Image: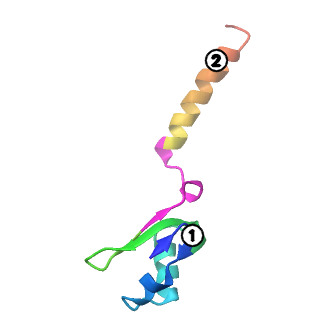
Amino acid sequence: MISDGHVVERARRKPGLRSSDLDHAVRLQNGDDVTEVDHGSLEPGGQLVLTLKSAEQGATKADVAQLTDRLRRIESLLSPAH
């Protein structure tokens, strides 16, 4: 349905999806535009599953906490007291 940020028109038309349906699905899955989608496919049950491009994926609280911890360790290694 979507490949590297581009709608595969033949795949979109086959099940009768409108462009607005795809745009809505992208927004529901935290994207702003189809160009942010790496891959999108229509599952047998009718659900549209999208994978955002790496650069468009948001960080989780755990990601931020892990980076904060790593930065603290680097700061402690660089401090003059070491």
In terms of secondary structure, where does tag 2 sit?
helix
Q: Residue at x 39, y 92 (%)?
A: 16
- Relative vertical location of residue 37 with respect to residue 78 in this rendering, above or below: below
In the figure, residue 41 lies in which quadrant? bottom left
Q: Is residue 56 magenta?
A: yes
Q: Residue at x 54, y 66 (%)?
A: 4
List the residue tagged with mark 2.
76
- Relative vertical location of residue 32 with respect to residue 53 in this rendering, above or below: below
Q: Nearer the viewer, mark 2 or mark 1?
A: 1
List the residue tagged with mark 1.
5
How far is the residue under mark 2 from the one under mark 1?
A: 42 Å
Disc 2 marks a residue whose amino acid type is Ser
User: Toward the viewer: 10 or 31?
Assistant: 10
Q: Residue at x 51, y 74 (%)?
A: 27
Estimate the x, y position of residue 36 in percent, counting from the top left.
58, 66
Magenta range? 50-62
Mark 1 packing: few (<14 Cα in 10 Å), some, or many (20+)? some
Estimate the x, y position of residue 46 in percent, counting from the top left.
30, 80
In terms of secondary structure, where does tag 1 sit?
loop
Disc 1 marks a residue whose amino acid type is Gly
Estimate the x, y position of residue 6 in percent, counting from the top left.
56, 74
Q: Residue at x 62, y 29 (%)?
A: 71
